[in-house]
Structure formats: structure tokens, C-alpha cells
Amino acid sequence: MTTKPQLRIINVSKRYANGSAVLDDFSLDIANDDFVAFIGPRGCGKSTILRLLAGLTPLSGGNIEHLGGEEIHRRTSFIFQEPTLLPWRTVESNIRLPLELRGASKDEQEDQAHEIMKLWELSHVSERYPLQLSAGMKTRASLARGLATAPRCLLLDEPFAALDAITRNKLCVELMRVREKRHFTACLVTHSAAEAVFLANRVIVLTANPGRVAEIIEVPETHPRKLAWRETNAFQEALNQVRNALNRVQEAAKQS
Amino acid sequence: MRLNLILPILVAIVGMIVWACLALIDTGLNSLPGPLATADALWADRKAIFPALGRDAAAMVLGFLLACALGVLSAIVLTTYQGLRLALAPWMTIARMAPIAALAPLLIVSPCPAFLTLLIVTTVACYFPVVSVATPALLATDKSLLDLFKTYHASYWQQIVHLRLPHALPQLMTAIKRAAIYAPMASLLTDYLAGALAGKPGLGRLLSEYFVGQNYPAIVALCLSAAAVGVLLAGTVHAITAWTLMHWHDNENGQA
Ligand SMILES: Nc1ncnc2c1ncn2[C@@H]1O[C@H](COP(=O)(O)OP(=O)(O)OP(=O)(O)O)[C@@H](O)[C@H]1O
Ligand SMILES: [Mg+2]
């Protein structure tokens, strides 16, 4: 893993039209091929960070540098909490959508879609409509679509939040497997400390009102990680660190 | 599977028998002609009835299609320009509520050719229900899907074509179905009126001739075939909409 930062969030602040600061003086470097997880109290601005990174909402202050310039900005994919599949398109057609919108040739669309569907084990449902898919399959399709354009950076806003524990674990492992084949930087927002520790190299614990970096917990275990790793002491130790940090943040919020 | 074919046919046969009986016994309904007499009259006067009916049907279908196309196009324009939308909104509502066919005499007494008169009244009558439903439907696109398209850097037209229009399709189809019911009402009523008021050639003038000649079987034949043309249009549109939405719209899914 190279350590050249790919994304620099520098003294960023954000306030929405209706008032108080959601983020204030927020700074973070994200390295190429890094996997960071954001965790923190409800409403502390986790989604806002991803939306700022994706350019979905304007900054109120500070700066975000995408090293590599505009090109890298265009090569960012956003995975929303809901699968946001277009119900009138089949799975394959949904996965082709981002390629279609950027004017890729039919051949290229087909090649990319087929490759990514194979990677996510979606080939057998390629002709199905979202209405005919289970929640897990929809999330798979949404992740596959996010990777169809070969992004350099994947922004995931609680993509597994609505899934049951078994499916969620399975998809975590899949995500890691796919990341071995398609290298990308990942920023994950989650409410599950276990998910954060299992997936990320660094877990960023945030404060609320305004959102700032409270603590960063490093998880040195190499990728890809196996489910069995969750039974080890190293995992438990990291998990406890994250939980304690979260408790401290919550305590601090109560006192203020 | 068989029953849903056999039972309606049975109902039709029973209906015919009841009709024939009503015609035989003295019901006080001034000599209601029976099915056979009606069929005879239709056959005898086919050279007068069918061309007139054909012209009305052509105006009806053409007016309907024109109204759908214009309605959707104006809805796109209104979606794009908020100022225009605000300025026109109350007038659109009023126009939608006004029974347009009531204004038909204005056109009938104008020197417009008969076909053009029918076409204009039908188009106007169908246009307002389509715009008034299509505009809010185009504006009601899911926020998260709009965000998704924003992350794809989709152009405005891509957003309209690949997102807003298909997303609005279920409501559009409902509006179009409603227009398909207005179309025959507008075109046939206008033609009846045109014959009665201005003696213009067509179904209306035929009707007055039959009245004067007390040719009741021909009147029934003409009215029933006019109704059949309307049912044919509405039925065709219904079938097309059900087929279009079959895959992805919950309500239609059960029927398909
Ligand atoms: N479009 C908006 N307009 C105004 N306020 C907003 C908007 N989006 C978010 N907020 C506010 O900003 C704060 C942070 O929102 P954000 O969605 O980033 O939090 P979050 O950490 O993702 O929360 P959650 O854990 O519930 O997902 C919240 O208080 C929210 O009410
Ligand atoms: Mg959120």
C-alpha cells in the first residue's frame, strides 16, 4: 500500500441553510488504497462528509483536494444506504447505467457489466428487475453498479444498515474479496463498530455538534481479512478501543 | 383461466337476449329496436355510418396522440422553468376542471373544416389532464435517485430521459388512460353538436336525419358503434399501459 494521500480534507466546515455548523474545522488525509471507516453518534455529520467528498453538497469553508485533480473527482462512486436501483431497469441494465451516461460504447458497457456481475455473483439474476430481488441481492447490485466505472474511490454510506447480520457479514467479506481484484480507496460510514473494525485500516471516531475527528484507531491486520479473524484477540482489542472511544464521545456530548 | 373467457361471453349472450325481449314486449320505450333490427340498419346504412365514424375515430386517435405528446413536452418545459410553472399553475387547474367539450360550439360555428374542429376539441380536452398530472409527476422524482444521477455527472437531458420520465411513468400512464376516456367523449360529442347546430356532415347530421325519418334502428346502430370505437381506444391504451408497467410497478404486477 502506497502512502501518498489521495484525498485531503483540510479545515472543512459545513453548515446547512437552516443554521448550526454540522462540521467544523474537519481535517483528514486519506491515502491511496486506504480503507477508512467513519463512526459516531447519530446526526454528527457522517453522511455530510461523504456528500462533500462526492461533490453532492457545497463546502461552507476549507478545502478538499483530490490529488490527481478533476479526473479523480469523476472517478468517485457513491453507494447509498438504499440500493437506489432504477426499478424499470434489469440488474444488468442498472449496472450499465453509469457507463451509458458517460457515453461508453455498447461493447464496453457489456464487457464491463458482465465482468462486474461475475465478480459480484450476479450473473444468474442479470435479467431480473429490482422488484424480484432480495435485499441482499439489491445491495450487491448497487455495489456492482458503483464499481462498474472502475472508480478510484468508493464512498459507502451505511450500505449494509438495512440487512440482517448474516447477509451483512457475507457482503463484508465479498467487499474485501472484490477490493483485492479492483483496487480502490474506500470511505465507509457505519453504526456498527464490528463492521468498522473488520473492514477498515483506520476507524475515525467523530464528535457531535460540530462534527470533528475525536480519535483515530488503527487496525493493522492485512487485507483480505477472513471472518475467522473476528474471533481473535487482536480484533477484540481494536473493537474495544473503538467502543471506548465512542463512549468517551458520548460522555463528552452529555456534559456539554 | 377458461372461466374468465366463458363467463363474460355468457353475460354478453344473456344481455342480447334481454335486449331482444325488451324490444319484443311493449316497454313503453318508444318502440326499442331489437339486436337484429339494429344489425340490419347498420348494414343497410353502412356507406353513411362507417365513413363518418371513421373520420371521428381518426380525429379521436390523432387528437389523443397529439395531446399526449404535447402534454408530456409541456410538462418537461414546466419542470425546467419554475417561473413559468408558477405563472401557469392556477390556469392549468382551471382549464383541467372546465369541461372542454362545452366550448365546442365556439369552434363549430367557426369556419374551420369539420375534421379540424374535431381534432382541436379532442386535443384540447385530452391535453390538460395529461399536463396537470405529468408536471407534478416529473417533479416528484426520488431525492436519492436525483443524488445518484448527480454523482454520475448526468446532463439535464440524461436526467429527464433516464430518470424523471421513467420514474413518472406510472402516473403518466394513469393520465394517459384518463385522456383515452376523454378523447371519444370530446370527438363524438363535438360531432353530434356540429351536426345539430351547424348541419356539418358527420355522425351528428346522420343522427338528425334518422330522427326526422324516425329510423330508430339506425340511431341505436350509430350510437352503439360510436360507443364501441371509444371503448376500443380506451381498451387498447389500457392494455398498452399494463404491458409497459408489468415488470416494475407493484400494482400492475399482479394483473400481468
Ligand atoms: N439537507 C440538509 N439540510 C439541512 N440540514 C441537514 C441536511 N442534511 C443533514 N442535515 C443535518 O445535518 C446534521 C448531520 O447530518 P448527517 O446526515 O450528515 O448525519 P449522520 O451522521 O449521517 O447521521 P445518521 O447517523 O443519522 O446517518 C443533522 O443534524 C441533520 O439534521
Ligand atoms: Mg447518515
Image (cartoon, coloured by chain):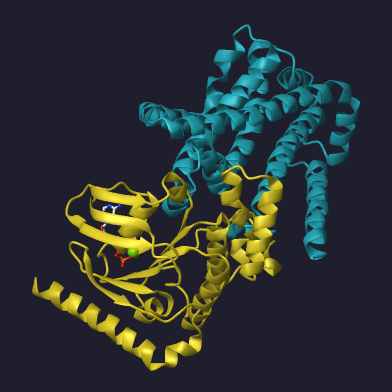
Chain B shade: cyan
Q: How many marks?
A: 0
Q: Is residue B254 visible?
A: no
Picture quarter with the C terminus of chain B: bottom right
The image shows residue B183, relative to residue A234, as above or below, that is above
Residue at (18% x, 63% y) in the render: A209
The picture places residue A72, in percent across and down from the top left corner, at 45, 50
Residue B158 vs residue B233, the one in the foreground: B158
Picture quarter with the N terminus of chain B: bottom right
The image shows residue B124, relative to residue B115, as above or below, that is below
Q: Is residue B26 visible?
A: yes
Q: Quadrant of ligand 2?
A: bottom left
The picture places residue B104, in percent across and down from the top left corner, at 57, 19
Q: Is residue B176 left or right of residue A241?
A: right
Q: Residue furthest top?
A: B111
The picture places residue A59, in percent across and down from the top left corner, at 28, 48
Q: Is residue B174 left or right of residue A73?
A: right
Q: Which one of the lettered chains is coloured yellow?
A: A
Residue B187 vs residue A121, the one in the foreground: A121
Residue at (60% x, 22% y) in the render: B121
Q: Residue furthest left?
A: A256
Residue A240 vs residue B120, the one in the foreground: A240
Residue at (67% x, 67% y) in the render: A118
